Amino acid sequence: MKYMATYDLMETMRVTNQWLGATAQAMGSYPAAGMSSNPWLKMLGAWGEVTERTFARMVAKPAWNIASVVGEDGRDHLVQVEHVLTKPFGDLIHFNVADRPTMDRKILLVAPMSGHYATLLRSTVVSLLPEAEVYITDWHNARDIPVSEGKFDIEDYTLYLVDFMKEMGPDTHVIAVCQPAPLALAATAYLAEENPKAQPRSLTLIGGPIDPDAAATDVTDFGRRITMGQLEETAIQRVGFKYNGVGRKVYPGLLQLSSFMSMNAERHGTAFKEHIMAVSKDDVSAQAKHNKFYDEYLAVMDMTAEFYLSTVERIFKGREIAKNQFTVNGKKVDIGKITSVAVKSVEGSEDDISAPGQCIAALDLCTGLPDDKKASHVEPGAGHYGIFAGKSWRNNIRPLVLEFIDANADAPKPAKSNVSKLKKKTA
């Protein structure tokens, strides 16, 4: 029960801060406050508005808010989110652009399950929509999934990716961002052995920890320092009675958010101080910029305990992907079985989460893949966020990824049999 009590305590603290913010905002908004020249009341209302919005966003799943996209005909085409495949822990969704011919490029974006919703890749989706059919993995918040649905660990995650790739067909190009990169690589290798005809055409891995030990960061250092017992004791809680997943063991999004914030506490503190001043001065443009980023950044989701713990134990500590020792349902997944899927790694030179060297390690694991099917890119000056959603992505990385996709758009040629080779020799 202590884990459930801790979860409810964190939720109580969040609701209390939201209520305090709403109360302060209401007090600062009284008409009588305008009779005083004391700026304190104005600042109180501004602080309340920012605080209420901040704590309210922590439990709200952001909307995609992609209303339309400009087509080649110069017209705005409406965008509708369609659920292609629905599963308990995540859906495969398609951004259907109305009244537009089906695009030749078909891209599956594999969103991370690392505390944020798939909407973290909204700008990535928007940048690809004009020139491709875009699909994405939309993972569910573990607190809303009943215990009766069972477990969900990294093996289940891998099998979800396998099902999504099968559903989309072999003319798919997969782009895995950050956390799912090693599991997307494993899913592709799984298909290479179990169902080769369902393999995608290409696989682009962006800033993922294929080999966490290739370049140390604070994330990898933390994974080495802490024991699994310590991690389970300090990070895992049970969902409280407020949500459908009551009793499910999770790594809470609020706990993950506090970790995110502490990594750059000074920068976030300054951002909120400046935002409160902007609200007090009715500076709408400054408010919009802040809200656009933090409405997404603060919206966090719980991960199942087994997924979080197995990620730390098997990807970071055991380095099962890096050692090519990963198993799914007791069967070894051999990454060397990938022989026809083109693989590209993308890294940022200033990435402090998945440092350069961690992702490119995937190419060495693809021992069965010819060199002309491998590619890599390190973006100078780019941090973690920039390589998939920032200026570096838009201006430099996106064109390179689309070029890589187009270069590998054709179906792989079937391997020549030994019989045909023998005929040529005897002719």
Image (tube, rainbow, N blue to C red):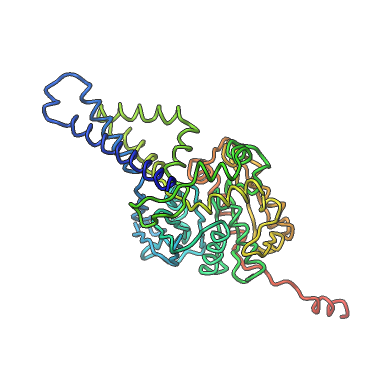
Is 129 above or below relative to 393? Answer: below
Q: In the rendered image, is residue 309 in sight?
A: yes
Q: Quadrant of residue 45?
A: top left
Residue 113, percent from left and from top: 49, 51
What residue sits 61% from the left and 40% below the top? 220
Where 320 sits versus 352, above or below? below
Q: Position of residue 61 (x, y in %)?
A: 36, 50
- Considering every residue shown, the one lying at the far right of the view is 426
Asked if residue 310 is positioned above or below residue 410 in the image, the reply reads: above
Residue at 43% of width from left, 60% of height from top? 147
- State the image quarter where residue 416 is shown: bottom right
Q: Residue at x 63, y 40 (%)?
A: 224
Q: Nearer the viewer, residue 302 or 335?
A: 302
- The x and y percentages for residue 128 are 47, 54
Q: Is residue 235 left or right of residue 99?
A: right
Between 301 and 102, the one lying in front of the other is: 301
Q: Number of callouts in the render?
A: 0
Camera sees residue 379: no
- Could you tell me residue 180's position as x and y percent? 56, 53
Occupied quadrant, residue 165: bottom right
Q: Tell which residue pokes out farthest to the front in this image.
A: 1
Quarter containing the C terminus: bottom right
In this rendering, position of residue 79 left or right of residue 127: left
